[in-house]
């Protein structure tokens, strides 16, 4: 067993959480830091397709916070541009998300925020590690998960400070 293995496990766990949560919740893309605050959108400014998707909000649209209006508008626009396969996948992930206990959803939200707080270079590294993890044979991924679960909290914490390995062991 290599010393880099726990780091791989940590990165994979963080990446899995971040990616699963981002897809399940389908949060809107974060505006750049220099972007002005979101401004309210009039219901009439939404396309007919968006209005159809968001019809449950029509009567209360004006009372929603501007950030919520923007998020709903961006999310509905993203939905409109998805292929049927992407929509089916998103619906399945949302169904899985809704089935999670509230405590687990809160934990995942916190992990997502931790991921989003990472510098862009680290976020990219996590994404790359996740991609490499997903390319591993299922048996190897299962073994890495098993090893991660067996680690103590102290072992997991010690892994966080180590530099990322150059490549996964085979």
Image (cartoon, rainbow, N blue to C red):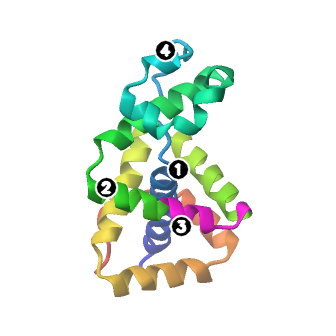
Q: What element carries label 4?
A: loop
Whole-percent x and y of residue 17? 52, 60
In the image, which disc is placed on residue 34? 4
Whole-percent x and y of residue 144? 45, 80
Q: Please check the rendered image and state whether residue 95 is part of the magenta-colored stretch, yes or no.
A: yes
Q: Which of marks 4 and 2 is nearer the N terminus?
A: 4
Which of the 4 quarters of the picture holds residue 133?
A: bottom left
Q: Which of marks 2 and 1 is nearer the N terminus?
A: 1
In the image, which disc is placed on residue 25? 1
Whole-percent x and y of residue 93? 47, 62
The Cα atoms of the two marked residues, 3 and 4, are separated by: 35 Å
Secondary structure character of the magenta stretch overall = helix
Can the viewer see residue 111 in this picture?
Answer: yes
Q: Name the residue rendered at 65%, 59% in the picture.
A: 105
Q: What element carries label 2?
A: helix
In the figure, 134 relative to 74: above or below? below
In the image, which disc is placed on residue 96? 3
In the image, which disc is placed on residue 86? 2
Q: What element carries label 1?
A: helix
């Amino acid at each position: 067993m290599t010393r880099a293995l726990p780091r791989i496990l940590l990165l994979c766990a963080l990446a899995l959480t971040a990616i699963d949560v981002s897809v399940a919740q389908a949060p809107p893309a974060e505006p750049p830091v220099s972007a002005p605050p979101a401004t309210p959108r009039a219901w009439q400014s939404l396309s007919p397709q968006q209005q159809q998707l968001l019809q449950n909000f029509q009567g209360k649209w004006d009372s929603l916070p501007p950030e919520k209006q923007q998020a709903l508008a961006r999310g509905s626009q993203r939905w409109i541009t998805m292929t049927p396969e992407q929509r089916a996948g998103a619906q399945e992930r949302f169904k899985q998300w809704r089935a999670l206990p509230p405590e687990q959803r809160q934990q995942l939200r916190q992990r997502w925020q931790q991921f989003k707080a990472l510098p862009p270079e680290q976020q990219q590294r996590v994404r790359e590690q996740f991609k490499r993890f997903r390319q591993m044979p299922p048996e190897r991924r299962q073994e890495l998960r098993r090893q991660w679960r067996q680690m103590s909290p102290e072992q997991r914490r010690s892994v966080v400070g180590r530099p990322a390995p150059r490549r996964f062991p085979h």
